[in-house]
Amino acid sequence: MSVKMVKFGLQFKATLENVTNVRPLGEDFRWFLKLKCGNCGEVPDKWQYVTLVESVPLKGGRGSASMVQKCKLCGRENSIDILRDTTTPYNAEDNETFKTMVQFECRGLEPVDFQPQAGFAAEGAETGTQFPEVNLQEKDWTDYDEKAKESVGIYEVTHRFIKC
Ligand SMILES: [Zn+2]
């Protein structure tokens, strides 16, 4: 029996202060996720990550995925792939609303939780000042924009998943 392919969107929401263009930086950005097996419902405790620099071939010549793994409980082989072209920055005008930042193509599993960590970037909303090292692990980030002489920040980061 073939397992259906489903696309999930990771929607990001935050309060932005004087910044825009919040985005994952680089091919090696790690999306830390908890993944639920669609067959038996198992959700491993540990965070797992997928990144664009890792690609694993799928059985039967069905292309490749960012990660292929066997469920520890039921043994089924599941996969998840980052859809490269769906990565979208979170901008000033998206402030406090959910916006899809990336989509994942999943076979046999679904993402159920997301932990933002280091590796994001942002820029000053009016100044274009680059902030290349934004860590959202604490769900809040602050810095200072020298050009604007004002504080910048990303607060109350939250997320949800939707079916695309
Ligand atoms: Zn399973």
Image: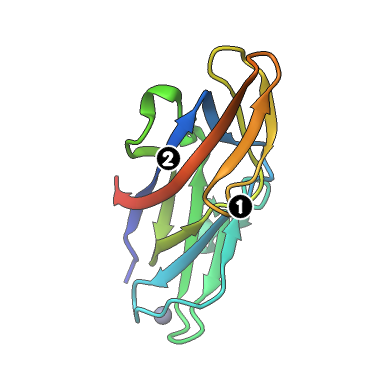
Q: Is residue 73 left or right of residue 57?
A: left
Query: Residue 14 got which mark?
Result: 2
Q: Where residue 13 sits in the image (x, y, percent)?
A: 39, 41
Q: Residue at x 54, y 32 (%)?
A: 22
Asked which colour scheme the image uses, the reply is rainbow
Which comes sooner in the sequence, label 2 or label 1? Answer: 2
- SS for dot 2: strand
Question: Residue beneath label 1, please?
Answer: 117
Residue in front for this viewpoint, 36 or 114? 114
Residue that protrudes farthest toward the left in the picture: 163
Residue in front for this viewpoint, 49 or 141? 141
Crowdedness near tag 2: few (<14), some (14–19) or many (≥20) residues, C-alpha within 10 Å: many
Q: Amino acid at mark 2?
A: Ala
Q: Residue at x 66, y 48 (%)?
A: 118
Q: Is residue 34 above or below residue 138?
A: below
Find ligand 1 in the image and state its quadrant.
bottom left
Q: Residue at x 34, y 66 (%)?
A: 2
Residue in front for this viewpoint, 134 or 88? 134
Q: Residue at x 32, y 36 (%)?
A: 97
Q: Amino acid at mark 1?
A: Gln
Crowdedness near tag 1: few (<14), some (14–19) or many (≥20) residues, C-alpha within 10 Å: some
Q: Where residue 88 sits in the image (x, y, percent)?
A: 47, 31
Q: Using the numbered discs, state the Cα–Cα distance from disc 2 to disc 1 in whole angstroms.
A: 14 Å
Tally of numbered tags: 2
